[in-house]
Amino acid sequence: MGHDITCSPESTDCSRVTPDSSIEHIEPISAPRISKGVSDLFPATSSPKLLDYISHNTTDFANLAGHKVYYNNAHYKSLFVRELSDTLARPPHIVSKQIMDGSFPMVTSGSISMPTGTEKGRFISVEIGGSTIRVSIIALDGNASFQVINHGESIITQEVKDRSGEAFFEYLASFIINQCILAGVNYKGSGHLRMGLTWSFPIQQISLSQGNILAMGKGYNVCKDIQGWELNNTFSTAFRNLGAHIEIGAILNDTVSSLLAYKYNCPSANTTISYVLGTGVNAAIILPSGDNTYTLYNTELSFFGAQLPTSKWDKIVDSLNEKPGFQPLEFLAGGRYLGEILRVVLQDLVHQGCLFSNVNQGALKAALQRPFSISTKALNDMELFRASKEDWNANDDSEFLHLLFGDVGAFTGASTNDVDVVHTLVKMLSLRSQILCALSIASLSEFISSEYSNTGKTTTLEVEVAGSGSVIQHYHGFKCSLGEYAHEFSNEGRSTKQGHLRYSINNSSDTGAIVGNAVACCLSSA
């Protein structure tokens, strides 16, 4: 495999989102080159002790940087595709077990036609999450555009979470009705207002507009009362008791909603994948189910990837999770864990005497002691800061380390070489996330292509991915590299006759979920 990976306009959008306005223009970068020699990644001036430690832990450092997956991507892609196929074909008793375990990948939302951008109407869009209810009144204008007529949200307090089932749904229904009143929407008319619902908890989906509640967590003690209740009937009863003519037209996962919203806004785009990478990882896909109908799947992608190689530091962080090994891809690539894995690696290198040897060890170890004290935002800020500097000096060392913890005092005495090593580790972790996410996108694309072939349909060589989440949209260089690696992994071994796939990772709207709910309501009533 060649090491020179370029970023071409036809394969991906290389625009950058720079959250720190104080950093001026930074030239677009191409996906990092991958070196087989792990020690080559580190500065040549690294201490002999560090280089010796690397030589005795080569596999761990290689896995931390995603080298094994990169150089064996065809093997791991085939494992991913097989895992997707096996999951889709699982027998009912396995489905039931996964539902009860809370790990239920490849959840279908039912058959639906695809948006054309001409959909029109006014709908209620509701998102109920871990601590918040959000309600929007959405008007689809029929020309691939929309208006948010009204938006309101409220914290769901612990007192509400502790209510009985009837009282809990009465609270939700009342808040939704109040938002209709604020928007001047008649909720008591002769017809029924249609509502799209994003329910951010496990359900057993029966149809596009029906689903049984399975579990909730996050302090929702009401779940003991409502487990097994069907959402559509339950909301309908609550609305009817309050004199409202509102009915649920669709119940969707937020990733599926984002995919529908993107298809509505860009109806001509060949978009069959919606990919979310923020705190966690997930994707939604579209598969054909009939002549003009398709099935939307919430893949719950975070549950895939148990076969991926890990380092000893990954294993330490994973062992401290409530459910070790529960969401392997999210653990290795999601934004929640990148900073924590870096913290554990730094702890180990300090303990081995390989890093920050001239720094006060008591203060340093105390700074590295607190779990999840390093955020993924800090990693991004460090990469942005490093990329913005043409000439590096000692003052830059302090600023760089300040981005790590904020407490520069803990790093008094740190050398530029220490900073270089930290920056290398940051690059390794973001690189692995890019590689693993690109591998999963390439695998999803291959899986979708095979499913289309089974129905006599074909997909084009232009693969557009609706990307969302803070890491894809804001992490320096991430979106560009993601598209390039997906392009590379998909095209290795393809003949000229087959043609080369071209990937475009496009930003999905931040309002994707609320618009997608409205679009689904419109399509379900057509």
Image: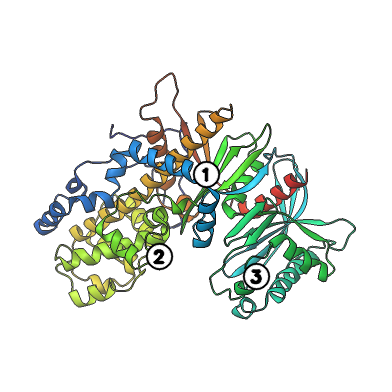
**The label number, if any, that marks residue 226 in the structure image:** 3
In which image quadrant can residue 71 be found? top left
Question: Within 10 Å of the Cα at label 3, are there few (<14), some (14-19), or many (20+) other Cα atoms?
Answer: many
Q: Please determine whether, in this image, residue 246 is positioned above or below residue 455.
A: below
- Measured as percent of width and height from the top left, residue 20 is found at 44, 58
Q: Which residue is mark 2?
A: 323
**The label number, if any, that marks residue 403 in the structure image:** none
Q: Please determine whether, in this image, residue 160 is positioned above or below residue 356.
A: below
Q: Which residue is mark 1?
A: 88
Callout 2 amino acid: Lys
Callouts 2 and 3 close, C-beta under 8 Å: no
Residue in front for this viewpoint, 207 or 367? 207
Query: Of the residues tagged 2 and 1, which is closer to the observer?
Result: 1
Indicate the quadrant containing the N terminus: top left, top right, bottom left or bottom right.
top left
- Rounded to the nearest angstrom, the CA distance separating label 1 from label 3 is 28 Å
Q: Mark 2 or mark 3, which has the lower sequence index?
A: 3
Q: Residue furthest top?
A: 497
Q: Residue at x 45, y 53 (%)?
A: 302
Residue in front for this viewpoint, 226 or 168? 226
Question: Within 10 Å of the Cα at label 1, are there few (<14), some (14-19), or many (20+) other Cα atoms?
Answer: some
